[in-house]
Amino acid sequence: MSTSAHFIIENAKIFTSDPANPHAEALAVKGNRIIYVGDRQGAAKYRSEKTRVIDGQGQTLTPGFIDSHVHLLWGSIWMGNAQLQEVRTKDDLKKILLDFAAKNKTDAWVVGRGIRYGIVSTRHELDEILADRPVYIGAFDGHTGWANTRALELASILHDDGRELVNGIIVRDESGLATGELREGDAMSTVMDLVPKPDAHRKRELLKLAIQEFNKTGITSVHNMNGDMDELMAYAALEDTGEMSLRVYVPYHVKPETTEEMLSEAVEMAKVRMDYVRGGAAKFFMDGVWESYTAFNVDPYADEPDVKVEPIFSLEHFTRMAALCDRMGLQVAVHCCGDGAVRQALDGYEAVQRLNGKRDSRHRVEHIEVCQPADMPRFRELGVIASMQTSHAPFSLEEDMVWTKRTGPQRWPISFPWRDLKNAGAHLALGSDWTVAPFDPLINIYVALNRQKWAPDDPDQRLTLEECIVGYTRDAAYTEFMEHQKGQIKEGYLADLVLFSHDLFALPAEEIRTAHVVMTMVDGRIVFE
Ligand SMILES: [Zn+2]
């Protein structure tokens, strides 16, 4: 007597991410678990009249994708603002903002998200579009915002009142008036804090919408890269009502002003271990981004050598807080775009190991846009995970002039060094950093497979398709201590699966985006098909 499966998927090209058994053609699912992986005949033994049999039609089936870096709740709320990702000119911006303003007449504010750098830089440019309502637009990377005069007046920052910000710069002209450009969190908050927040009902609706969109692209888990108990509870509420279809790992955001006592919130979050929603980590920011001259670098900026950047945490401050987190069993993740920030995070982790002893802590560095060669082997030595998002890399020299200008040709060979870090033995976890970049894994994989060299002598940093899938599944599961539960198609593992429209391995690298997801399963339930 054999057990009856709820699902059998047969005739698929299964890539399991299991190094001991990388390929299979069929599998069986019972409840929320995979109960069989192998050939068609073997799967047939689990078939009964209650079993739904899915024909994979010879296409690729992989473990569900785990995006190791997203901003889920933030992003959902973004979805309720004007979407500026496709804006390329001031005219595009004008059209979208005026259209959005007309459709949202009862909202006092006009807020837009996702704009590239270099399209507007002053309040006057926004005043020309709309002057009688407060306007705020945020850069795609969340590190810079621009406000019109009305918004600056409402925030009482048009005139310099001598206020000091911990983390942020209100850019001012020679006469002391705010230009409209707001760099980093505290500066953006002066204006953003005035924008009415969506109410709980609206938030929940936007969140459900975002989760559905994730499922459509094959994403079954995310690491939400900022958060607190409130945010964790927003996800938990969806799980309670049976409406959750995305596993969410939620760290606690440690800010420079966070005290040691406040870390108890992170400890409380770590106790939440539901099927879909889990705490257990702490997220820091060591620096900002290259584009706005807030990345903490080893050598001066190529285009503004006089700019001097200080890290958000001193080495002593970071080490003290990270050591506390480590002692409480929390995983630490730290945003580092500049090579100076990467180095300081590694120095901090090394100091934490000396203080607390070496344990299986799997601390992580996020982004790593530039990394000094001497620091690359330290990831393996310290057991630190490289969490990287391939779409951040300028695809070609023409595609992103700002980033490549800031860093300059001398740094290009050590920029977005996925290949070099992997070769140096780092665990490479892939993700998108949505809303900074699109979450669709096939878009991010396309960049990883096809990124061009910016100069002929730059090293080739491209990854293989197999490495991309492993980075999005097995290594991402390892990154959240879930490698024995998910990230591989293996008997006993969670039934988080994704079936594609094509045999991905048969597609030329440049055509990978012609494929799409046809079925996503989470916890043994089909959530998209
Ligand atoms: Zn991020």
Image: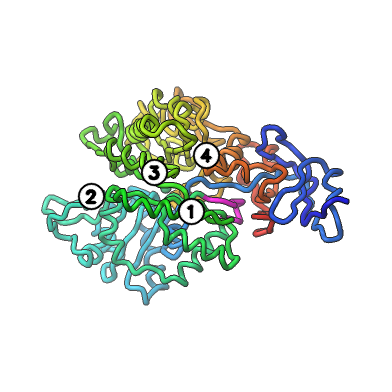
Instruction: Please state which of the two labelled residues, at mark 3 or mark 4, is closer to the viewer.
Output: 3
Of the numbered discs 3 and 1, the one sitting upstream in the chain is 1
Q: What label does residue 271 carry, if any?
A: 1
Q: Amino acid at mark 2?
A: Val
Of the numbered discs 4 and 2, the one sitting upstream in the chain is 2
Magenta stretch holds residue 27: no
Label 3 near label 2: C-beta < 8 Å?
no
Give the x, y percent position of residue 364. Answer: 44, 38
Task: Give whichever of 306, 283 is nearer the camera.
Answer: 283
Residue 210 to residue 345: above or below: below
Label 2 near label 1: C-beta < 8 Å?
no
Q: Which residues are magenta?
A: 214-222
Q: Residues within 10 Å of mark 1 (few under 14, many from 20)?
A: few
- Residue positioned 47% across, 39% down in the render: 388
CA–CA distance between discs 3 and 4? Answer: 21 Å
Q: Residue farthest to the left?
A: 175
- Residue positioned 81% across, 57% down in the render: 51
Q: Amino acid at mark 4?
A: Ala
Q: Residues within 10 Å of mark 4 (few under 14, many from 20)?
A: many
CA–CA distance between discs 2 and 3? Answer: 22 Å
Circle 2 sits on which residue?
Answer: 166
- Give the SS element for disc 4: strand
Instruction: Please state which of the two labelled residues, at mark 2 or mark 3, is closer to the viewer.
Output: 3
In the picture, measured across the screen, residue 247 lies left or right of residue 433, that is: right
Task: Give whichever of 232, 441 is nearer the camera.
Answer: 232
- Residue positioned 70% across, 37% down in the render: 506
Give the x, y percent position of residue 483. Answer: 59, 41
In the picture, measured across the screen, residue 37 lies left or right of residue 113, that is: right
